[in-house]
Amino acid sequence: MQLTGMLHGAKLLKLAGFPTSEVLGPEASEREIKELIDRHGEIFIKPVFKGGVGKKGKSGLIGRAKDVKTALAEKERLYFVTHTFDKRTMKANGVTFEGGVPAKHEVYFSIADNTRYRAPTMTITHHGGVDIEELSRDKIVEVPFDPLTGLKSFVVAHALSDLGAPKEIISPLVQNLPKLWDLYHHYGMTTLELNPIRMGMGKSGLVPIACDFKCGFDRDDPRAARLELPESLFTEDISDFEQEINQLRTYQGQSDVYVVNPKGTILALTFGGGANSLVTEALGDDAIISSDFGGNPPYEKMRDVARISFNHWLPQTNVLFIIGGKANNTDIFITFRAMADALREYISAHGPQPITVVIGRGGPNLVRGLVAFRDVLDALRVPYRIFAFDSAMSSVVDYVKGIDKWMKAGGRAEIAAALGLVAETEETVLRAVAE
């Protein structure tokens, strides 16, 4: 669950006592907008999206105005604007009006869980105003810290000194940035990012003022419920498929999914975070989903996961790809039997499917699991290829990509003919994708 923008971000930051730009919501009257302009000289108009959305500035989705007429024109332009980001197209529903903050210095700051250090990590730079990934490594600092003691002032001070930050911004940041740890820690966040923090002039000197906000929540952490944020903030940033899978979340077994390309042709049911990262990156746009179903899920949960996946994606699938590393505690027989039963039930209800199945796995009860899956595939007359635990995962992925290309070049039609189906044309497949 992600939240971006200052409409709700300003309210959260005030819980920690962190200064923010002045923000009006989409319901602001012309009089309120004019008064905001009078106070700040200039305002920014930004669309409100649900979920995590970035690169609005680069896409021309931030307006600026020094008079009410321009502000209202920007409101009309941006209120329901669509934005394609990270392979998703999202539609805004409203805008914010944010007071301008004149400043000489801009700062990027974030706190996030870091698997490299196995600790929360602060990332900071005073070279603000650019995408963080565009900075050279000598202009940005990552500092892990102990979650038991939290983010202390000296951690911020040492990081800024190492960066050679201007002296006038160090003290205000040292006084205020540690407040963000309380917000991050007490409300179940996994990421918290302010970009930019503009160093505005206050009554007694420079003050760090948050001008944009992004955070992510751990949906399984009960502390996130303390904020009492409306569920509607998060309901539209996921697809129907993701929402169905998320309803299966329990203490046992992963059920993390993300739709990569709704027009893809490889349905990858992946087990393990490492496998998920490798497979998703290697398959690219050919992958339909990115997934992690590890954690020893019980039979009923795994069968439901597979059933939902097949119902949504199997008609357009060329390759059903079941892949994972060598498991430590996941019972391969249980998970394979569940997926095989779900596939048999789907084909019994919808008829034969012109697909190829590729399996690569290792772990407890591997042989029993492979035999159970093989027997079902043989009975269904589905072509398959099985790789055991001693096969390199990257090589298996390359094999899957090759099979997908063959399917697109006529292999799918060959399998359809062998199954006694009407020969499929490209138009038939495209219709299945559209449906």
Image: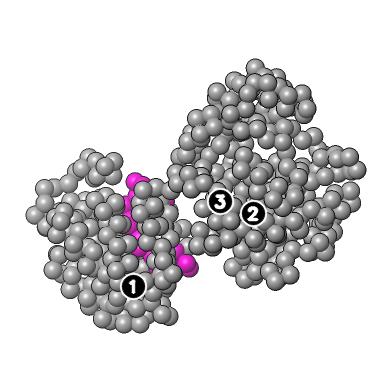
Badge 3 is on which residue? Answer: 228
Which residue is drawn at the image coordinates 24% and 41% (left, top)? 431
User: Mark 3 belongs to which amino acid?
Assistant: Glu
Q: Height in image: 354 above or below 364?
A: above
In the image: residue 124, left or right of residue 223: right
Q: Which of these two is toward me, 342 or 362?
A: 342
- Cα–Cα gap, marks 3 and 2: 18 Å
User: Closer to the N terminus: mark 1 or mark 2?
Assistant: 2
Classify the position of the C terminus by image quarter: top left
- Residue at which label 2 appears: 192
Q: Secondary structure at mark 1?
A: loop
Residue drawn at (15%, 65%), measured in percent from left and top?
380
Q: Amino acid at mark 2?
A: Leu
Q: Position of residue 298 (x, y in %)?
A: 33, 72
> What range is drawn magenta here?
260-276
Q: Which residue type carries mark 1?
A: Pro
Taking depth in this image into account, of 31 and 398 the one nearest to the observer is 31
- Residue where numbered disc 1 is placed: 298
